[in-house]
Image (cartoon, rainbow, N blue to C red):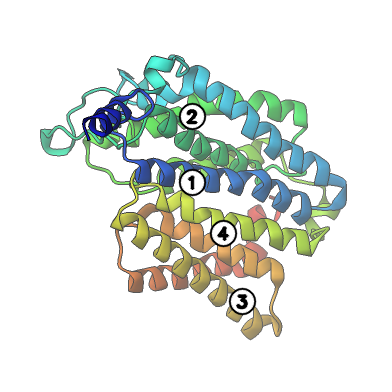
């Protein structure tokens, strides 16, 4: 009996199993990280390669593949601690490597240093898993942000220009938004809530993509007039990976395997399904037939819409959000786009 107690004590306090480690939370967070990673690679790699014209397929896929690898190296060498480390400026953290064993095996902490939160109350989350898990989870968010941005310049940007753009935008743009909202910056102090990246990821990549598309310039007129996907089945496969991976995207945001994660996963799928059905219904009503590309677009707008509040809203609200995300973007793309000369040049 005494021998069993000694063995249990040694196991409990061994370096591989510290007392604060919750194996369930750690397993879920690593699973969520993998799901988000699958959204990018192979999800968006396949989606981008198949949704563009055949002549752009390889370049589009490689842009996503390169971004995934480049972001990871930049993230562990410098950018993680710029986004979540000690404060350098109200909108930026102090850059430093996140590679040391002592650092990575310590208990995770968000924000990493002590900050005063909303209403001047200490507000630090300490998940029950090591920093290595958190660093990788946040990397997958950073990577998909760049890859989503790439969607705005498919068929426009040279791969060499993209290779230079990725680390520069990550360092000088993404880390600013991440630190300001999630890392203890000025928006964090103001009490701004971004559940899982509606601002840090989707808003930033959307605005950056629009800006990049404007400065890079429009595609050729013949390409703008007809832009069919080169492989519809692969497009659906990529879209499916993106949708299923979003369960990790929003389900991992609470940093634990808890009830918030459960409701976030359900709301994510409810909103995406509603948005897809609304978009498809509008296609049938106004054009007489459904569109596979339209269904994918509706799915993506629904996923983006629910992200800022996936674990915060009730499920009936997720349906309402899906109705809005399936209709408002449809009007902007199918009606306003045809009437606005500026949008037609994009």
Image disc number at residue 280: 3
| Most foreground residue, 194 or 209 | 194
The image quarter in which residue 115 lies: top left
Q: Relative to 46, is 168 above or below?
A: above
User: Residue 271: image x %, image y %?
Assistant: 45, 67
In the picture, measured across the screen, residue 2 lies left or right of residue 161, that is: left
Q: How crowded is mark 1: few (under 14 residues within 10 Å), some or many (20 or more)?
A: some
Residue in view at x 34 percent, y 46 percent: 194
Residue 279 x, y percent position in the rendering: 58, 73
- Spatial CA span between label 2 and label 3: 35 Å
On the image, the x and y values in percent for residue 42 come to 68, 46
Do the residues bearing badges 4 and 2 touch, measured as CB atoms within 8 Å? no
> In the image, what residue occupies the spot 56% across and 76% down?
277
Contact between marks 2 and 3 (CB within 8 A): the answer is no
Upstream in sequence: badge 1 or badge 3: 1
> Which is more N-terminal, label 4 or label 1?
1
Which is nearer the eye, 26 or 169? 26
Q: For residue 243, which numbered disc appears in the image? A: 4
Which residue is the site of mark 1? 31
User: Residue 177: x, y in percent?
Assistant: 41, 34
């Amino acid at each position: 009996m005494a021998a069993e107690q000694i063995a249990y004590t040694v196991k409990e306090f061994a370096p591989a199993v510290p007392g604060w480690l919750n194996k369930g939370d750690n397993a879920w967070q690593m699973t969520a990280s993998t799901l988000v990673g699958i959204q990018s690679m192979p999800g968006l790699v396949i989606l981008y390669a198949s949704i563009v014209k055949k002549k752009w397929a390889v370049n589009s896929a490689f842009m996503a593949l390169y971004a995934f690898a480049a972001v990871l190296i930049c993230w562990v060498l410098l950018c993680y601690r710029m986004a979540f480390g000690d404060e350098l400026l109200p909108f930026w953290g102090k850059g430093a490597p996140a590679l040391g064993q002592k650092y990575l095996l310590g208990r995770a902490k968000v924000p990493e240093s002590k900050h005063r939160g909303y209403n001047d109350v200490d507000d630090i989350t300490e998940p029950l898993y090591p920093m290595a898990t958190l660093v990788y989870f946040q990397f997958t968010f950073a990577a998909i942000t760049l890859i989503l941005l790439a969607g705005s310049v498919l068929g426009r940007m040279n791969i060499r220009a993209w290779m230079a753009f990725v680390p520069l935008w990550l360092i000088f743009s993404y880390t600013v938004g991440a630190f300001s909202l999630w890392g203890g910056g000025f928006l964090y102090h103001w009490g701004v809530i971004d559940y899982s990246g509606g601002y840090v990821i989707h808003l930033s990549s959307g605005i950056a993509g629009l800006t990049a598309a404007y400065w890079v310039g429009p595609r050729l007129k013949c390409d703008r007039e007809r832009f069919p996907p080169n492989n519809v089945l692969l497009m659906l496969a990529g879209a499916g990976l993106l949708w299923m991976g979003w369960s990790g995207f929003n389900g991992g945001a609470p940093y634990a395997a808890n009830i918030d994660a459960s409701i976030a996963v359900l709301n994510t799928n409810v909103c995406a399904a509603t948005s897809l059905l609304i978009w498809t219904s509008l296609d049938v009503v106004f054009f007489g037939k459904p569109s596979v590309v339209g269904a994918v677009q509706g799915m993506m707008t629904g996923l983006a819409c629910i992200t800022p509040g996936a674990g915060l809203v009730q499920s009936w609200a997720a349906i309402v959000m899906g109705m809005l995300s399936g209709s408002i973007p449809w009007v902007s793309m199918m009606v306003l786009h045809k009437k606005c000369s500026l949008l037609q040049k994009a």
